[in-house]
Amino acid sequence: MIYQIKSSFKTILRLTILLPISFLLVGCASDLFIKGNQEASVNELLRTIDSCNKRVLGTDFKQLEGKIFFPAGYKLTSSDFSNQQKPSVEEAALIAKLISNQNLCESNYLDWAKEHAPKATQLTMVYSSLNIDIYKKLAAGGDTYGQAVSNLFSNLAAYWKHLKLLEINIAENNKESTKQFLRDYLIKSAIQDAQNPTGNLIVGCGARGVNFVTGSCN
């Protein structure tokens, strides 16, 4: 009886330790975003990008506002996407300045990723790189402002979708990792119990009970 109580206590103790660990693994590792949700985090990234562009261009930023950059809270309209105007020589020079100084902004984007979504760092840098490609084509006169706005919008939509897919993949992978952790732990515990001679005796004697003095069944 004493052993049975100890054995039961050992099992309860294992579960008491194991369950918080399993909940911790499931609860904290399934999310891509460690600060806020996707919408809040991406909005913060867009503010970071906007702030950097303004630092690089200074007061000249106003010349591109309403064409390629828009005020906070502005809702794009069909006319923004259908703008057939191409950058003037002066505007192209400003866009080129923005492109050549984008390396100054990269540390800001990395800081954002570190604070909001470390596992999305590479994806975020690809998103930024694709935006630069759009600026390059615009500055070279290959696209109109409307085409550039459309491409930037599409790039943001793709980035949003890939963030969601990444979050789902991380959650699924962590779910499998947690399952494997629990499986390995329980198998290890079962092996340890099976190797305990007293434990085997209790199982073997069943309802007859164990005589621990003689090491046999009653």
Image (spheres, helix red, strand yellow):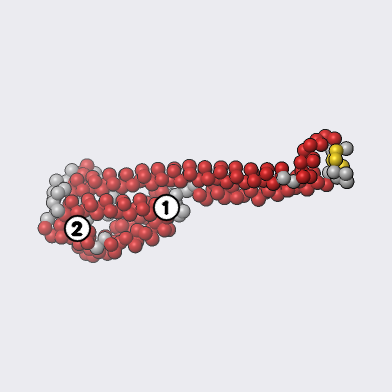
Please tell me the numbered disc located at residue 95: 2
From the viewer's perspective, is 56 left or right of 120?
A: left
Residue furthest left in the image: 89
Query: Can residue 54 be seen in this snapshot?
Result: no
| Residue at screen point 12% across, 55% down | 88
Residue furthest top in the image: 207
Secondary structure beneath dot 1 equals helix
Q: Position of residue 39 (x, y in %)?
A: 39, 48
Q: Position of residue 37 (x, y in %)?
A: 44, 49
Secondary structure beneath dot 2 equals helix
**Amino acid type, callout 2:** Ile
**Amino acid type, callout 1:** Lys
Query: Can residue 134 be seen in this snapshot?
Result: yes
Marks 2, 1: nearer the viewer: 1
From the viewer's perspective, is 214 left or right of 144?
A: right
Per the image, the residue denoted by label 1 is: 119
